[in-house]
Amino acid sequence: MTRKNQKYHLDHNTLSFIPVERNKFWKKRSLLQYVFVIAMLSMVGFLSLSQFRLTPHEYLLAKENNQISEKILSQKTTIASLRDSLKEVVENDDVIYRPFAEIRPIPTEIREAGVGGTNRYSELAGMEYSEDVIDLLNNFDKLERQIQVQNKSFDEVEELVSFIDDYYAAKPGIRPISRKDELFISSYYGRRFHPVYKRYKMHHGIDYAAQIGTPVYATGKGVVKAAHYQSGYGKVIKINHGFGYLSVYAHLSKYIVSKGDTIKRGQLIGYVGNTGVSTGPHLHYEIRKNNRTQNPLYFYIDDLKDSEYQKIVSK
Ligand SMILES: [Zn+2]
């Protein structure tokens, strides 16, 4: 058997091939070449990473792994941006919406409350990307929980705000006659010397001197409790606004609403007169809260302009 690359020469005496002994220099040179080639190959292998030595299946797996990493990164970004948006909503809720509905902010420990335990996704442990995936799922769960808390808060605010809307629509809030029709206030709320009875007496309302036939408007939404003649008050309308409020319009010349009618704020209900115990044409206007009279001056919306008032009463 002959070795490859082995050189031979013909011995003319024996007529046989004799192996040629290599000299030391050539031996060294071949070794260097060998080392050089190995070095080059491993460099190429290193530079091209694993591609040259991966089977197609491994190559697909590696590609898939890359995609998973990218997906995880993009989900992390999504969670971060969702968390930012939610943070803004939560801040508005605690600073604007809930205070508006007159309810306290939700404590942070409730908003931040976690779900399940830390081992909720333990079956996913020990795999590639386990830590990232579990972290991602936990963050999604936390976000979901926080969104649930926020939605509950919105329901609460919505309910109370609709209640508040009703409350402010009903609560007496405007003057019963237009400023342009009012001649002067002939009597304020409080103790006074009564012009007819000639003694000090509590005056439970405010008297607007005005001409007979001046329109009188309901000061809040409600239901007519009475529209009848009553001694002292003369022709009087009483409106029940709910929430404990009642408004009274007395000494009228005429009423154009009846008991049981539903009334809007600003609706024309009758006209100024001089009926009952009265020393001249005027409107006696009264507000009662839980059957106790209140000073009507405290109920007017202070910064309501005449033009705005006219818009309310002409609806
Ligand atoms: Zn009066």
Image (cartoon, rainbow, N blue to C red):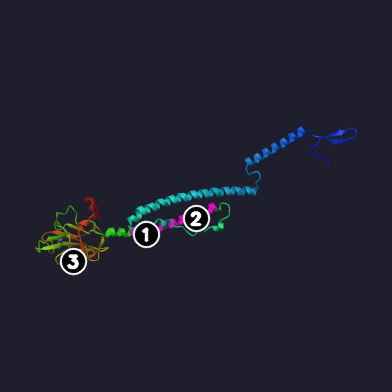
Q: Determine the residue located farthest toward the right in the rendered image.
A: 13
Bin the neighbour count of mark 3 within 10 Å (Cα to Cα): few under 14, some 14-19, many 20 and up.
Answer: some
* Coordinates of residue 102 in the picture (x, y in percent): 32, 57
* Coordinates of residue 304 in the picture (x, y in percent): 23, 52
Of residue 79 and residue 166, the one placed in the foreground of this image is 79
Q: Hey, which quadrant is residue 149 in on the image?
A: bottom left
The magenta segment is 131-160
Circle 2 sits on which residue? 138
Q: Main secondary structure of the magenta part?
A: helix
First of labels 3, 1 by sequence position: 1
First of labels 1, 2 by sequence position: 2
- Relative horizontal placement of residue 269, taking residue 84 as reference (left or right): left
- Relative horizontal placement of residue 308, taking residue 232 as reference (left or right): right
Q: Residue at x 44, y 51 (%)?
A: 83
Q: Determine the residue located farthest toward the front in the rendered image.
A: 24
* Coordinates of residue 138 in the picture (x, y in percent): 50, 55
